[in-house]
Structure formats: C-alpha cells, structure tokens
Image (cartoon, rainbow, N blue to C red):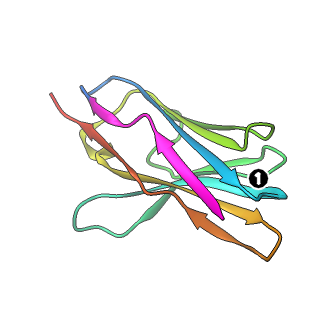
Amino acid sequence: QVQLVESGGGLVQPGGSLRLSCAASGSIFSIDAMGWYRQAPGKERELVAGSSRGGRTNYADSVKGRFTISRDNEKNTVYLQMDSLKPEDTAVYYCDAGILTTFDMRNYWGQGTQVTVSS
C-alpha cells in the first residue's frame, strides 16, 4: 500500500512564504513524475508545478518566478517552495506521483493541505 502525506500548509500574509512537503511511503519500486495541484473553492483542480524523475520542471504561468518545485528521490519526497504569496494562491494543495509498485504503475494523490493567504 502506498501513501502520500503532505505537510507545511497554513495561514500566511500576502508576500510571505511557505514550503510544502509530500512524502511517499509503502511498497515503492520507483517514482516517475511528481507534482503539485491546487483547488480553490468553486474552481477546478489545476496543475501548479511538476517534476520529472530526472528533474525537468514545469509551472503554471500564474506561479512562474514565485514557486519552486524540487524533489529528493532518495527520500521519495517532493517539495514546493512558495514565495511572494498572493491571496489568489489560497487553495487546498495536493501532491501527485506516478508510482511503480509490486502490482502496477499508477497515480497516487495525497490528502491535501490548506494554504490560506490573507492579511
């Protein structure tokens, strides 16, 4: 069984920073792409940032230059450094990973962590 556990969310003032972490655990052979998504109230879930196993990254236009995705393959962990946060970044943030286990290769999701940007 595989689990993704996110941490690091919270309340921050506009212009502030947060660092999200997502650790995968369980019967994992390898992890392919990892990424962060977010969903604000009344909106669809959207991709924020993604990282291939080799470290190639991509970002939503709305976060380019402010957010940085990184990963530690030894720890099966992906991070999202969020700087210069804006109220419109408020959302539940989810991590996603393509994981190969004994049984199959599929995407797994974390439970989500709330990020609120407000003064």
Look at label 1 and name its amino acid.
Answer: Ser
Q: Residue at x 74, y 63 (%)?
A: 99
Instruction: State the residue in front, 49 or 7.
Output: 7
Query: What number of labels is visible?
Result: 1
Q: Position of residue 36 (x, y in %)?
A: 53, 52
Quadrant position of the C terminus in the picture: top left
Outermost residue to the left: 119
Name which quarter of the figure residue 71 lies in.
Answer: top right
The residue at which mark 1 appears reads as 52
Q: Position of residue 107 (x, y in %)?
A: 65, 69
Q: Residue at x 43, y 34 (%)?
A: 8
Quadrant position of the N terminus in the picture: bottom right
Q: Is residue 7 above or below residue 62?
A: above
Q: Position of residue 9 (x, y in %)?
A: 37, 37
Q: Residue at x 80, y 76 (%)?
A: 103
Residue 102 is left or right of residue 114, and the answer is: right
Which is the main secondary structure of the residues drawn in magenta?
A: strand
Q: Which residues are magenta?
A: 1-11
Residue 97 is left or right of residue 101, and the answer is: left
Q: Secondary structure at mark 1?
A: loop
